[in-house]
Amino acid sequence: MAYKKDQGRYARMTAFWALFLLAADGCLRSLQGTLRGWFPGMAEDFADPLPLIGQVDGAKLTVLAVLAVSGYVIHRVLERPKLADLLIDTEHELRMVTWPSFKETWAGTIAVIATVFTLLFYLFASDIVLSAILPRLMGSAS
């Protein structure tokens, strides 16, 4: 039974799919090739090609089994009360966020760019001035 089934639905779905896709990426990129390297006999085809999967061999079957178990484990972990409450609270807080309008975002962007260029010119001028003064102060005329 799901813990607080209808609460925090989007946060839980996002967390589940992010973790599941990360597991799928690891399985498909690394585990499948590793299994084929360790057990060359696993590369033998067991059946005709399937849609979206292609040829079914021992490595693919193992990867699919690991993905199925990973999906179940991820789902069960996300249903733990503490973690589920965290995701519910996260979604609740995100619903209370007021996002800036395009005009406010653009004004903030211009302010940041102006600040960066002001600091750039200040540091550039300071570097030139100090590069000219410090060698004379230290006694080595270049």
Image: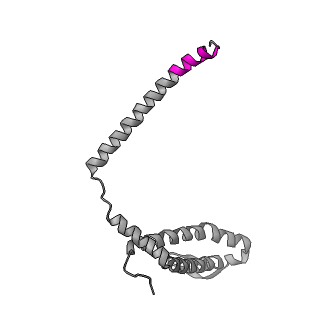
Q: Among all residues in the image, which is located at the extreme top?
A: 141
> Is 128 on the left-hand or right-hand side of 38?
left
Principal secondary structure, stretch drawn in magenta: helix
Nearer-the-camera pick, 74 or 4: 4
> Is 129 on the left-hand or right-hand side of 39?
left
Nearer-the-camera pick, 97 or 65: 97
The residues colored magenta run 129-140
Vertical side of 48 occupied by 133: above or below: above
Vertical side of 26 occupied by 139: above or below: above
Identified at 73% across, 72% down, the residue is 38
Nearer-the-camera pick, 5 or 52: 5
Identified at 66% across, 68% down, the residue is 33
The answer to which image quadrant residue 106 occupies is top left
Q: Among all residues in the image, which is located at the extreme bottom?
A: 1
- Picture quarter with the N terminus: bottom left
Identified at 63% across, 17% down, the residue is 138
Q: Position of residue 77 (x, y in %)?
A: 53, 77
Q: Position of residue 127 (x, y in %)?
A: 52, 25
Identified at 69% across, 77% down, the residue is 42
Is residue 14 highlighted in magenta? Answer: no
Q: Position of residue 115 (x, y in %)?
A: 39, 36
